[in-house]
Image (cartoon, rainbow, N blue to C red):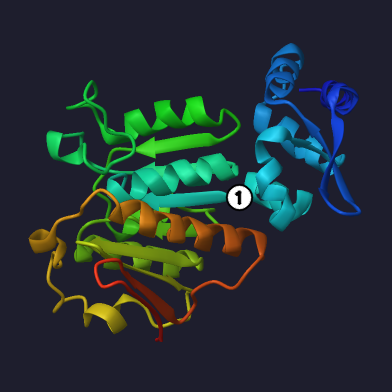
Amino acid sequence: MPRLDLDRAVAELERESAPTELAPGREVRLVDEAVVLRVASDYGVPKRRLELAALEAGVAPRRYHRNLGLLGLHGQARLLEAKVGVAGLGGLGGLLTETLARAGVGRLVLTDPDSFADNNLNRQAFSTEDNLGRPKVEEAAARLARINSAVEVEVHQVEGDRDEFERLFAGAAVVCDALDNLPARFALLDAARRLRVPFVHGAIAGMTGQVTTVFPEDPGLEVLYGPPREAPSRGVETVLGNPSPTPPMIAALEAQEVVKIVTGVGQPLRRKLLIVDAFTPYAAVIDL
């Protein structure tokens, strides 16, 4: 695509944009989503590339307006530039992935071996009555395309082991654990360590959940679960289940970790475990 077409497309967005005050003395130019879609189509410009060029020129798609007060134009651009891997598209993964797409994470690589079943309907974001039996990765890709067409989505219907996770998530800025068994979690952590990228872990059971972020040189899941060979395959969720409100509680916290890592805004839960128990209620941050 000629650079001239991109420059013209950005110039049109600038003409169609309007100044908006984020805070006293702090202004940004915003452009409507319908305009971004039309201009991308008219000039044959990939939407993510157009949004990045517009942000560089000081113009933000209005869809990201509520991100900008905290993240600014630079932070939003860093999200659009980022590639994030998510393993698991169930209760945690579906909600986490949709949140990342709405935030504007530009490239998502998603893995899950399963298809939707009746017992997913209580908590899994991409599960509906009319897609039972359909692969989760296919439904995720279709849903995310409707939410944010600037996001480039790559899906793989695989169980995944360490080597496969390492291959599929190569180039990611962050790898996210939304899995439901400990052997796969340990394999994913090993892959993240080999890729030298942060690993965001989330787990749920009943009304309780936990989140931590493991950088490559940090102690990891072995601190929580013991040596990989001695850890049980499944946790207490097999007894307590996963009621509908619990996955979004923890998925949101995982998404916050990704945003903090990618943008540099805020302090990740590095060497810390956040435990949230909505039953009691109780919350605590434990040093690891």
The quadrant in which the N terminus is found is: top right
Position of 231 compared to 246: left or right? left
- The image position of residue 61, as x and y in percent, is 73, 34
The quadrant in which the C terminus is found is: bottom left
Position of 269 compared to 185: left or right? right
Query: Residue shown at 48%/80% (left/top)?
Result: 217
- The image position of residue 211, as x and y in percent, is 38, 68
Query: Residue shown at 27%/56% (left/top)?
Result: 161
Above or below for 178 versus 137:
below
Instruction: Say few, some or many: other residues with alpha carbon within 10 Å of mark 1 (under 14 / 14 to 19 / 20 or more).
Output: some
Q: Secondary structure at mark 1?
A: loop
Query: Residue shown at 36%/43% (left/top)?
Result: 94
Residue extending farthest to the left is 239
- The image position of residue 6, as x and y in percent, is 82, 26
Residue extending farthest to the bottom is 287
* Foreground pick, 216 / 62: 62
Query: Residue shown at 71%/34% (left/top)?
Result: 62
Position of 46 compared to 105: left or right? right
- The image position of residue 260, as x and y in percent, is 59, 63
Number of marks in picture: 1
Above or below for 52 versus 238:
above
Query: Looking at the rendering, which quadrant does residue 95 occupy?
Result: top left
Query: Looking at the rendering, which quadrant does residue 241 occupy?
Result: bottom left
Residue type (three-letter) at the residue carrying disc 1: Ala
* Foreground pick, 44 / 115: 115
Above or below for 45 versus 174:
above
Residue extending farthest to the front is 280
Please give the residue where the numbered disc 1 appears in the rendered image: 82
Above or below for 109 versus 282:
above
